[in-house]
Amino acid sequence: MIQAVAQTFNTTAEAIRESRGSLERRVIAYLAFEDGLVPLRRIARGLGLTSAGGISNLATRCRTELARDADLSALVEACRGRMKRRPPPFRFPIQTPPLTARRYHRAPTRGRR
């Protein structure tokens, strides 16, 4: 995720980690929190922050800026396009009980017993 933002903004991942309060850090926090569903502590560790609350603040600031700035929205979409997506986790099919002759031929109940 950091690499996708670094490529979009023409910078390096190390420069983003070392900068404080930059737009790139806000975009990373926003994308990781909203799209990646990454825990706040893990995002903070990746950006070199000590508090997970700081990530929440960065994501909130980016969310408000996105509502006002169309150019920033285009940059965020470009970052999303460069991100490597993991396939969704495998889900087991819904288990339905087998249809037996007894269940098939049973008369429907009428509501009262």
Image (cartoon, rainbow, N blue to C red):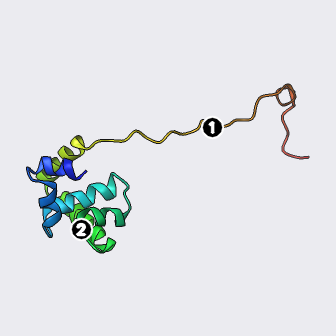
Task: Please rate how many residues cluster around mark 1, counting C-alpha atoms within 10 Å: few if below 14, some from 14 to 19, many from 20.
Answer: few
Task: Please rate how many residues cluster around mark 2, counting C-alpha atoms within 10 Å: few if below 14, some from 14 to 19, many from 20.
Answer: some
The quadrant where residue 16 appears: bottom left
Q: Secondary structure at mark 2?
A: loop
Amino acid at pointer 2: Gly
For this rendering, which residue is in front, 68 or 9? 9
Is residue 3 shown left or right of residue 91? left
Q: Position of residue 81 (x, y in %)?
A: 22, 41
Amino acid at pointer 1: Ile
Query: Residue at the location (20% across, 58% down)?
Result: 27
Disc 2 marks which residue?
48
Q: Position of residue 11 (x, y in %)?
A: 9, 53
Is residue 82 shown left or right of residue 106? left
Q: Position of residue 30 (x, y in %)?
A: 26, 59
* Labels 2, 1: front one: 2
Disc 2/disc 1 C-alpha distance (Å) = 42 Å
Is residue 45 shown left or right of residue 10? right
Relative height, residue 60 to residue 2 (above, below)? below
For this rendering, which residue is in front, 102 or 46? 46
Disc 1 marks which residue?
94
Query: Residue at the location (20% across, 47% down)?
Result: 4
